[in-house]
Amino acid sequence: MTLQKQLEDVLATGDKAFVPYIMAGDRGIETLKPTILKLQQIGVSAVEVGIPFTDPVADGPTIEQAGERALAHGITLRKVLAELTSFSQEIHIPLVVMTYLNPILAYGIEDFAKDAKLGGVQGLIVPDMPFEESALLHTALKEHGIALVQLVSLTSPVERIKKLAAASEGFIYAVTVNGITGERVSFATELAGHFANLKAASNIPVLAGFGISTIEHVKSFGDIADGVIVGSKIVTALVEQDWATIEALVQATKKATIN
Ligand SMILES: O=P(O)(O)OC[C@@H](O)[C@@H](O)c1c[nH]c2ccccc12
């Protein structure tokens, strides 16, 4: 089943989607399997699996430091895909890999797409790949049924928003702030109109991400989006093994208002 369809099935139950971001191999590659299995068990809709990178330009300190820890554990894209493949039979939720472009190019686009598929990967986010260049990856991804998710920023002009929304696969990643990843206290007040434009420009799910870190945040984005992506807050909670915080966010998101 495709990433889009699996998310739509979640939404069809009346729940909103909750997608945690994890840094693969933060605390070692052997923690990847138990982490994903436990997230699946507590009812997340998909998992965004981050690959550590030496120059993570879109990331704030929490994810940057998680990446440094993972790199110190020797984590590479190849190791992550091999590890995912070893337990892919046990995973029933979609996995979306988030990596910068360079590790994919070093791996080889064809080989990457093939191995990602073997690992159960259904979607890909590449924040430093210009939209105009996405054809570079698209052919190989398409062949292996992997959706290429587009990020839409708040500052994109309307015409560009329309173009990105129409081209995005799986879901639209609606970035909620200007700047880098990391927990925020509050958001701009005029976001509802932006999300309404995105919904109008496409018929795939629209997920909000960047800065989302509290119960109040997930509830308010549940009002205007199809779900949320939570990174930095989850990365910190996983380091502390604070599963209560993660479960509370998942539950609050699911119950968020349906438009
Ligand atoms: O950490 P935050 O603010 O909750 O944001 C989500 C985010 O971490 C995750 O989706 C992500 C991590 N690194 C990225 C780089 C670009 C886009 C998205 C990401």
Image (cartoon, helix red, strand yellow):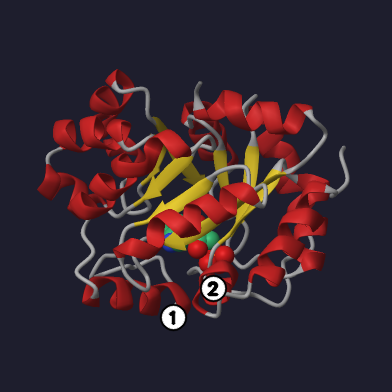
Specify which label sits upstream in the sequence, 1 or 2. 1
Residue 178 visible in the snapshot: no
Indicate whether 132 appears above or below 19. Answer: above
The answer to whether the beta carbon of the residue marked 2 is less than 8 Å from any atom of ligand 1 is yes
Give how far apart the Cα atoms at labels 1 and 2 are. Answer: 7 Å
> What amino acid is found at the position of numbered circle 2 in the picture?
Gly
Which residue is nearer to you in this view: 140 or 165? 140
Q: Quadrant of the C terminus?
A: top right
Question: Which residue bears the numbered disc 2?
Answer: 182
Residue under the image location 24 percent in, 33 percent down = 113
Residue under the image location 60 percent in, 64 percent down = 177
Whether residue 59 sits left or right of residue 74 in the image: it is: right
The answer to whether the beta carbon of the residue marked 1 is less than 8 Å from any atom of ligand 1 is no
Residue 53: image location, x then y, percent: 26, 65
Residue 188: image location, x then y, percent: 73, 65
- For the residues bearing labels 1 and 2, Cβ distance under 8 angstroms: yes
